[in-house]
Amino acid sequence: MIAPMTPPTATPPPLTEDDIQRLQALLDGVPAPLEPLDVSALDGYLCGVLLQPQPVLPAQWWPGVVDVDARPLPAGFDAAELQALVQRRHAELAQAIARRDWFDPWVFQLDEEAMPSEAVLPWVAGFAAAQDRFPGLMASDDPALVEPLALLYLHFERDDLEDADALLAVIDTLEPPDDLAEAVQDLVRSVMLIADVTQPRRRTPPGHARPGPGPRSRSGRRARR
């Protein structure tokens, strides 16, 4: 069981590079046959959890962190440090989303030859894993969700998107990002656009505008010619 979380009273300090490396080491230490998320997928998963129309309790989302099939940790396994780091990132992302502030997704450059989609795919896969476990967001028929979801799911192979005609129709109008910086910007922008639907705000306080430049076309990306 994960320890109860209390709402943070102040913005939690971002995890440092050392913290992220420690978190990955702790995830790697989860015993087989469990298959935990890596830190990039974890980051997308937490965003996918936080964007649900109804709050998801820690006891509900935690099993998906330590195993892709949500199998329980073995008795006696000490997950306290792992839980603490994951909860800290959860709180950091929750406040960024609530305030519509920029955050740095945990996306890592693979190598100079890798395409941007290859680098962001683990993050998007984690986001998609959250949707598989908690279908509230994807069950919404709000048309405003289609474009930001398309910006995320365009990184998947087309054959992986079954029964997603509305998404595919928009994806077909989009060009892949030119570089990793643009791909990362699209992740954050999509998160904020989804939050505008699932967690609408009455007004945007000064200094907390949605990150990134405005849309370059109706869909927010260059349309294919």
Image (cartoon, rainbow, N blue to C red):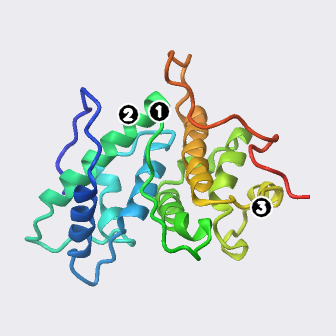
Q: Residue 22 carries which label?
A: none
Residue at mark 2:
95
Residue type at mark 1: give it.
Asp
Q: Is residue 129 left or right of residue 141?
A: left
Q: Is mark 3 on a helix, strand or loop?
A: helix
**In terms of image quadrants, where is residue 50?**
top left
Residue position marked by numbered label 1 in the rendering: 101
Q: Residues within 10 Å of mark 3 (few under 14, many from 20)?
A: some
Residue placed at 24% from the left, 26% from the top?
9
Q: Which residue is at a point 27% across and 67% down the rendered structure image?
A: 24
In the rendering, at what x and y percent does residue 131 appear?
52, 57
Q: Which residue is the extreme one toward the left?
A: 76
Residue position for label 3: 168
Amino acid type for the residue under numbered disc 2? Gln
| Residue drawn at the location 69% of the way across and 59% of the way down | 178
Determine the secondary structure under disc 2. helix
**Alpha carbon of mark 3 to alpha carbon of mark 1: how far?**
29 Å
Return the disc, 3 or 1, that comes first in the chain's sequence. 1
Of marks 3 and 1, the one in the foreground: 1
Closer-to-camera residue (177/50)? 177
In the picture, the quarter occupied by the N terminus is bottom left
Between discs 1 and 2, the one toward the N terminus: 2
Query: Are the residues tagged 1 and 2 within 8 Å (C-beta)?
Result: yes
Q: Nearer the viewer, mark 1 or mark 2?
A: 1
Question: For the residue carrying disc 2, how many other residues have a C-alpha within 10 Å: few (<14), some (14-19), or many (20+)?
Answer: some
Q: Which amino acid does label 3 sit on?
A: Leu
